[in-house]
C-alpha cells in the first residue's frame, strides 16, 4: 500500500469523526412535484448546493443535492434524491473524469436516514437512541482522493415520501443507474455526458451495485459502464434472511418486509396474517427508524417472536408460494453484466452469507462475465455483532478503490472465474 494511498485513507477516516449539525436543506426540497415530470429516467428535477462540515474551500469536493426522475420496481416513474460530489483534485488518468454511482449500505427506513441528509454533517444524534452516522463518507472521500466524481443515491422512499424499498432489486438498480444519468445532466461539473461510469456498494449497497451492473445493458445502455464493485452483496434474500435472524441486525428484517409490502401490495394481507401483534408493532416502528435505533430496539431478537405461529420467518415464508415468488424476483445473478465486476465477501460474514455471494460470482462467471472474487478470511469476532460483516468493508478498501481506478485507467481486469 503506497504512502500516498494511506494518507488519503487516514484523511477519509478523520472526517468521519466530525460531529456537526446536519447539512440543512429546505424541507420542501424533498417534496416531489404533485406529478412526476414528463421526460426520461435520470432527468434532473431540482438541485441545490450542499454544505459539507468536512469541506475546506473546494476540497475535497463541491457537493450538490439533487432530485431526479427514476422508475420503481414495476417501471412506474418516481422521484429520488441524492448527492453529487465534484472533486477538487484532477483526474490523473486517461480520458475524461470518471463517475462512480455509489449505493449506500443500510441506513434505515425513516426519511431522516437519507444519505443526502446525513453525509454533510457525518454524525448526528437525537435522544435517546437516534444516531445517524454517514459511514459512506470514508469511501466517498477515498474515491474523491483519486479525482473520481461520485453520486450517492438516497434510493426510493428515503427522504422522499413513501416507504423505502429496502433491498428491492429493480428499484435500487434503477436508482443507481438513474443517479449516474442525473449527475451527467447537472450543469457546471467536471464530468461529461459520455464519460465513463462505475458502480460501488457494500452490503445493501453491494446488492444495489450488483443489480445495477447486470441491469445496465437493458435499462441504461447509454452509460459507458467500466466496472462495478459489489461488497457482501445480498444476492439471495432468502439465505440472507436466515443468516441475519437473531443477530444485532434482526430489525432489518422489518425493513425488508415493509419494502415488500410497499412494492407488492398483494403481499400485505399475507404479512399481516402471518405476524402477531408484536410483529406488526415492530414493522410500524422500524419504518421510521435509522439503523442505530433499530439495532438498539430489536437487536438479537428472533423473528419467531414476531410470527403468528412462533416459527422463524424463514420457515413461514418458505411455505407461502407468493413469498417464494417475490423473494425469487429479488435474486441477483439471472442477468449478464457486460462490464467486469469485483465481488468481495468475508468467509465468516455473520450478516450476509458468504456462500450466496460466491454463488453470485459463479452465476456471472457461467454467463461469461469477467469476475474477480475476493475472499476475506477474518476469523469470527463476537458472531452476530456484525463485526465480521462491517470490518471487511474497510479492510477491503485498498483493493476496491484500486480495482475501480484501474478500470477507469483502461487496465485489463483480473478474472479468477476458472479458479
Image (cartoon, helix red, strand yellow):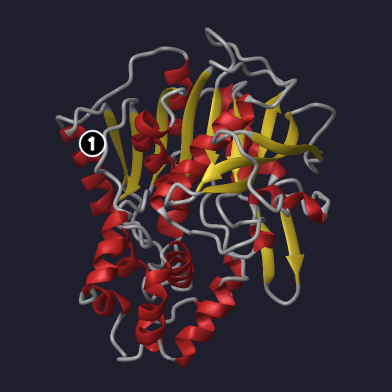
Counting from the top left corner in percent of width and height, residue 307 is at: 36, 86
Q: Quadrant of residue 328?
A: bottom left
Q: Quadrant of residue 219?
A: top left
Relative to the observer, which residue lies in front, 266 or 60? 266
Is the residue 116 above or below the residue 177 in the image?
A: below
Residue found at x 42% / y 12%: 410
For disc 1, the marked residue is 364
Relative to the observer, which residue lies in front, 322 or 140? 322
Residue 230: in sight, yes or no?
yes
Is the residue 84 above or below the residue 120 in the image?
A: above
- 288 left or right, relative to 124: left
Counting from the top left corner in percent of width and height, residue 252 is at: 47, 68
Counting from the top left corner in percent of width and height, residue 276 is at: 42, 90
Counting from the top left corner in percent of width and height, residue 201 is at: 47, 42
The C terminus is located in which quarter? top left
- 96 left or right, relative to 403: right
Residue found at x 25% / y 63%: 325
Residue 11: in sight, yes or no?
no
Amino acid at each position: 500500500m503506497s504512502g500516498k494511498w494511506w494518507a488519503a485513507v487516514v484523511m477519509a477516516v478523520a472526517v468521519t469523526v466530525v460531529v456537526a449539525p446536519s447539512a440543512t436543506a429546505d424541507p420542501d426540497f424533498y417534496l416531489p412535484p404533485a406529478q412526476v415530470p414528463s421526460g426520461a429516467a435520470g432527468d434532473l428535477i431540482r438541485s441545490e448546493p450542499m454544505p459539507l462540515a468536512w469541506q475546506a474551500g473546494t476540497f475535497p469536493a463541491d457537493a450538490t443535492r439533487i432530485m431526479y426522475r427514476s422508475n420503481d420496481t414495476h417501471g412506474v416513474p418516481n422521484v429520488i434524491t441524492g448527492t453529487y460530489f465534484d472533486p477538487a483534485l484532477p483526474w490523473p488518468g486517461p480520458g475524461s473524469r470518471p463517475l462512480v454511482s455509489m449505493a449506500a449500505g443500510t441506513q434505515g427506513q425513516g426519511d431522516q436516514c437519507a444519505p443526502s441528509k446525513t453525509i454533510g454533517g457525518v454524525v448526528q444524534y437525537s435522544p435517546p437512541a437516534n444516531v445517524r452516522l454517514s459511514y459512506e463518507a470514508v469511501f466517498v472521500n477515498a474515491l474523491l482522493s483519486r479525482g473520481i466524481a461520485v453520486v450517492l443515491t438516497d434510493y426510493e422512499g428515503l427522504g422522499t415520501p413513501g416507504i423505502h424499498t429496502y433491498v428491492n432489486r429493480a428499484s435500487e438498480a434503477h436508482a443507481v443507474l438513474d443517479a449516474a444519468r442525473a449527475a451527467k445532466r447537472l450543469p457546471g461539473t467536471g464530468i461529461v455526458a459520455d464519460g465513463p461510469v462505475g458502480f460501488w456498494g457494500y452490503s445493501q449497497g453491494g446488492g444495489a451495485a450488483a443489480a445495477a451492473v447486470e441491469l445496465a445493458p437493458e435499462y441504461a445502455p447509454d452509460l459507458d459502464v467500466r466496472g462495478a464493485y459489489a461488497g457482501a452483496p445480498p444476492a439471495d434474500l432468502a439465505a440472507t434472511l436466515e443468516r441475519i435472524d437473531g443477530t444485532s441486525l434482526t430489525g432489518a428484517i422489518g425493513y425488508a418486509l415493509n419494502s415488500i409490502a410497499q412494492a407488492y401490495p398483494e403481499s400485505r394481507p399475507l404479512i399481516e396474517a402471518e405476524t402477531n401483534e408484536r410483529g406488526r408493532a415492530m414493522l410500524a416502528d422500524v419504518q421510521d427508524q435509522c439503523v442505530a435505533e433499530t439495532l438498539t430496539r430489536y437487536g438479537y431478537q428472533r423473528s419467531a417472536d414476531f410470527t403468528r405461529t412462533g416459527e422463524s420467518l424463514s420457515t413461514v415464508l418458505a411455505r407461502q408460494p407468493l413469498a417464494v415468488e417475490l423473494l425469487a424476483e429479488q435474486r441477483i445473478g439471472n442477468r449478464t453484466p457486460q462490464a467486469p465486476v469485483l465481488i468481495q465477501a468475508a468467509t465468516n460474514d455473520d450478516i450476509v452469507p458468504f456462500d450466496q455471494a460466491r454463488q453470485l460470482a459463479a452465476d456471472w462467471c457461467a454467463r461469461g462475465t469477467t469476475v474477480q472474487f475476493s475472499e476475506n478470511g477474518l476469523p469470527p469476532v463476537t458472531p452476530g455483532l456484525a463485526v465480521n460483516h462491517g470490518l471487511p468493508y474497510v479492510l477491503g478498501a485498498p483493493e476496491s478503490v484500486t480495482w475501480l481506478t484501474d478500470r477507469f485507467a483502461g487496465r485489463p481486469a483480473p478474472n479468477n472465474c476458472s479458479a
